[in-house]
Amino acid sequence: MLGCKEISSVRNKKCKMIMVEKQGQPYILLAYLNRSTVEMEYRTLHMARRGGLRVPRIIQMADHEILLEYVEGKTLYEELATGPVFKVGLLAKGLAKLLKDAAALLDGWTVANVDLRSYIVAGTVLYGFDFDCMVTGSYCETVADAVLSVFCEPKIPQDRVVSFCRTFVSAAGVDPTELRTAICMMTPILREKGLLKHTDQAIESAIL
């Protein structure tokens, strides 16, 4: 692990995010399964940081790993599940801005599979860590994916889910009809996998 000592780790859909220590200093290590994913992640993080997005500084890259500067905080998932209620709206606006800025910077590409564990909250500032899953598509599809990602987390209280999504969608500034269409296309797949526990009515109420 690039000469690092593992302290703790969190796994998301695409990689293992590990808090490590090297020469007495904390870092974040992203561990992937293959070299091509690491290279894509490296290029995207580098471009994002140069473009002014809130992403950690790259320290080193190896065959399947990227070592990043340590950003102290909790994941977006942890904050929404157990953090202060007053932060919910701020975090919704923060995620909307981060994804909107990423879509503008990476013209023609969009973030797919928004994972709440790939974002770190430092105070009220949101940092993105994991952008390797980039696809050609619309920003609206990214917004729809983010909404459904929140609804797929059963441990986040329902009132927080609704509050977060309403603020997020408003801040995202997407066309409501286009958003509903994107969500309707994604929900059958999530239900088939047993990930989406909420009704269509609950989702609709959250994006009004």
Image (cartoon, grey):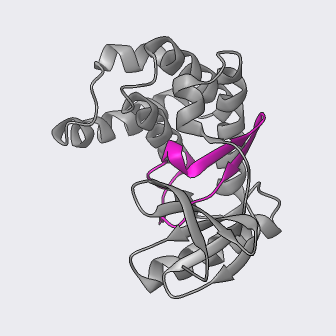
Q: Can you say which quadrant of the picture contains the N terminus?
A: bottom right
Is 115 contained in the magenta span? yes
Place residue 66 in its image quadrant.
Answer: bottom right
Give the quarter of the image for residue 56: bottom right
Which is more toward the observer, 31 or 202?
31
Where residue 195 appears, as percent x and y from the top left, is: 27, 36
Q: How many marks?
A: 0
Q: Residue at x 40, y 28 (%)?
A: 151
Q: Position of residue 172 (x, y in %)?
A: 64, 34
Looking at the picture, how far across and down is residue 165, in whole percent?
A: 54, 24
Residue found 46% across the figure and 38% down from its top = 144
Q: Is residue 13 left or right of residue 54?
A: left
- State the residue lying farthest toward the bottom: 63
The residue segment tinted magenta is: 112-139
Magenta highlight on residue 119: yes
| Residue 18 placement, left or right of 91 | left
Q: At 39% across and 21% down in the image, what residue appears?
A: 203
Q: Foreground residue, 36 or 84?
A: 84
Give the residue drawn at x 57%, y 16%: 163
Vertical position of residue 127 compared to residue 55: above or below: above
In-front residue for pair 126/167: 126
